[in-house]
Amino acid sequence: MEDSKPTLVLDRVSKSFGDFAAVSDLSLQVRPGRVFGLIGPNGAGKTTTIRMIVNITVPDSGRIELFGQPMSTAMQDRIGYLPEERGLYKKMKIGEQLRFFAELKDLRGAEADKRIDAWLRKLDLFSWKEKRTKELSKGMQQKVQFITAVIHDPDLVILDEPFSGLDPVNVELMKETILEQKAAGKTIILSTHQMEIAEKLCDDVCMINRSRKVLDGKLREIRRSFSRNAVALQFQGDEGLLNDPELVANIRQNGDDTEVLLVPGANPQQLLKRLVDSGAAVTRFELVEPSLHDIFIEKVREVA
Amino acid sequence: MRKFFAVVKREYVQRVRTKFFVVATILGPVLMAAFTIVPALMFGIKAGGPTRLALVDQTGKMYERVAKELMSGKETRNNVATMEPPSQQPIGPNNSKEQINQAGKLIKPTFVIEQARLDNRSIAEVRKELEARVQNRELEGYVLLPPNLLKDGQPEFRARNAADLFTKSNVESAISRAVRGQRLVEAGIDEKTVAKASEPVDLKTIEAGGKESKGDASFFLVFGLGLLIYMSVLLYGQFVLGAVIEEKETRIAEILFSSMRSFPLMMGKLIGVSLVALTQLGIWAAAFSIFSLWAASGSSITLPHIAPMVFVYFIIFFLMGYFIYSTVYAVVGSMVTTTQEGGQLALPVVLMLVAGFYLSFNIIRSPSSPLAFWASMFPFFAPITMLVRIVTETPPLWQILLSLGIGVATIVGLVWLASRIYRVGMLMTGKKATIPEVWRWVRQA
């Protein structure tokens, strides 16, 4: 799958509003069947990028290619889009509303009704079908909005901050649903600034800050490349064992946990061996990769 | 195209099903009647009994004549009007003299006249007494005929309500007639000859086409149609404004634009709402037809005859007005962020419509004047003014077609402009757009 043709290609895409550059010279590739995280702080240009992908706005320069073809209105039906700012008709019944949005994606007839019912059941909303939007809670509206993005079974699903406003139960439900979509072979673009979620869901990430790409690639590789040779430790024994400038560069205490930053090039196994040999009871010894959060902060500070 | 129909269907179904639509459809004619007939009745009907006047005759010979003219007068001839149901005689809330006269004729003015004799009192004393009686509501007013009335003296009319124009004009003409009669008699002409010579002419109005004019009824028909266009364009234009603002405010626009192009979206919206309007007008037209059929078969009520072509022209010019104004409303809606701002920005648009409506008062009186011609060519006025001209004095066909042509060209131009502004405007958030910004959008899009 890794070498198959990318679902989406952005090639040196730029967009500015007046003097403000929203997206500058952005290139990226989204491969099929993967969850692609578009991450960055607020105002970095995520939403503008997505709007160009779904053909709401047109880039000033650069090229966007979807499913191997240049962007066009005909392609819009193959994309499902959950915008960051939710929009549902307040006075319309949920069932009718979904039907309307399905028709906008060229899905109609009995098939549309069947899928609407199936999705409403799946997301525990079926009893709300005849209710109007304004009677629903924010989280429910969010789930309805999600259905509008996937009802027509699109090949590419773009979710802009899909977890905002959801309670923990629904966050889990949403995560499961996203992974199901992935399992069904869909390509998913997930834009978020919630790093912990991105970390758990994404295969690839692209980080943008102040309109520019600062980092992209497979999440695993990125984390490895940012690895600082750190070990999370929990043990009972002589703490003085750690005081070896040839092996340990820094020690940080977090409650019961001790985080040990090793000297560059040092072998963590050496530390483990020393601890075990000394007779200390080691309950935890884990090589720590930096969290996306840490990488994100580091990258943003670097640019600033 | 299928997406376009999805938009049309949604706009139509969601609106027709609302309680508002049902209520407005039922209440619409009632409101129309209220707007036209009630002010007329208010204006025409004098509350209370007959007008009690005291007449102070200082000439010593005019009382009989003036009293006679006031009591009977020539108003009998106009009583024809009062025998028809008042629904045929709606009068607008405007104050042109002509209309006041028309409304005045609706009601047979009744006067109770008494003679206030001087009885050796000074005129000032009599005045004082009469003033007191007027204050005590024993009299509505009094008339002073000066001794030199027949030469050049000015009679004086004092009334509690000096603003009552009907009474004033009735008194004025009664005295005039009396004075004229007396002068003729004094010039040696036989009383009978005078009476015969004063017999008024009954003007029979015939339209140039040869059929007898519908007269007052025609006037009210024109007025009613103008008002109906004005109100429905305004109402349905506001619907479009509200719909656009809702989609912008709730960010539905983003999903819509990610699914279809802005042009079919905007057109779908405009056409969907226009179908709602046509449905409503259709229901009214059907109700009116059934009512006039019923009225024609044996009831005493006669409705003004409306030529079928008038209906056709009405629908055509309603659609023209609707598309011109609702396109402008769509632009306004996409430029603002809240309904309140929309209302402010739409005010000049509403004023244009009001201007067209008021112009029609002038055009009813002279439907072929240069003003009428130009007003009916200007696309923002034409929906009302051209219709008024067609119903009053049908202009040459080329003028109607030219007016429609200009209208259609305007609609095409506006829609082109609007669909550019709409797309960009709908995605803008946070602040109201300025005119230079909007101009940039037009060039960029």
Image: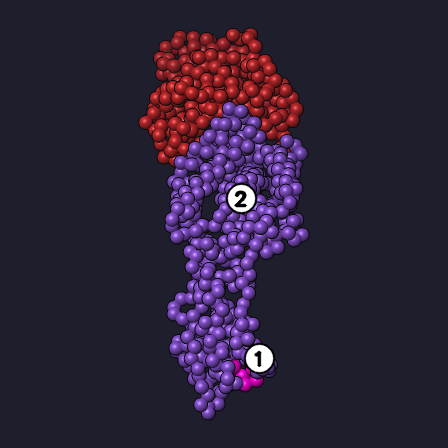
Chain colours: A red, B purple
- Identified by mark 2, the residue type is Val
Q: Which residue is mark 2?
A: B310
**Upstream in sequence: badge 2 or badge 1:** 1
For mark 2, name the chain: B
Q: Position of residue B375 (x, y in %)?
A: 63, 49
- The quadrant of the picture occupied by the C terminus of chain B is top right
User: In the image, B208: left or right of A197?
Assistant: right
Q: Residue at x 45, y 68 (%)?
A: B109
- B375 in relation to B171, above or below: above
Secondary structure mostly taken by the magenta-highlighted segment of the chain: loop
Q: Badge 1, how many Cα within 10 Å: few under 14, some, many 20+?
A: few
Q: Which residue is mark 1?
A: B189
Q: Magenta segment, which residues?
A: B145-150
Q: Is residue B319 visible?
A: yes
- A71 in relation to B98, above or below: above
Is residue B146 shown in magenta?
yes
Q: Position of residue B281 (x, y in %)?
A: 47, 41
- B381 in relation to B1, above or below: below
Q: Are marks 2 and 1 on the same chain?
A: yes
For mark 1, name the chain: B
Q: Position of residue B212 (x, y in %)?
A: 54, 53
- Identified by mark 1, the residue type is Ile
Of A293 and B272, nearer the camera is: B272
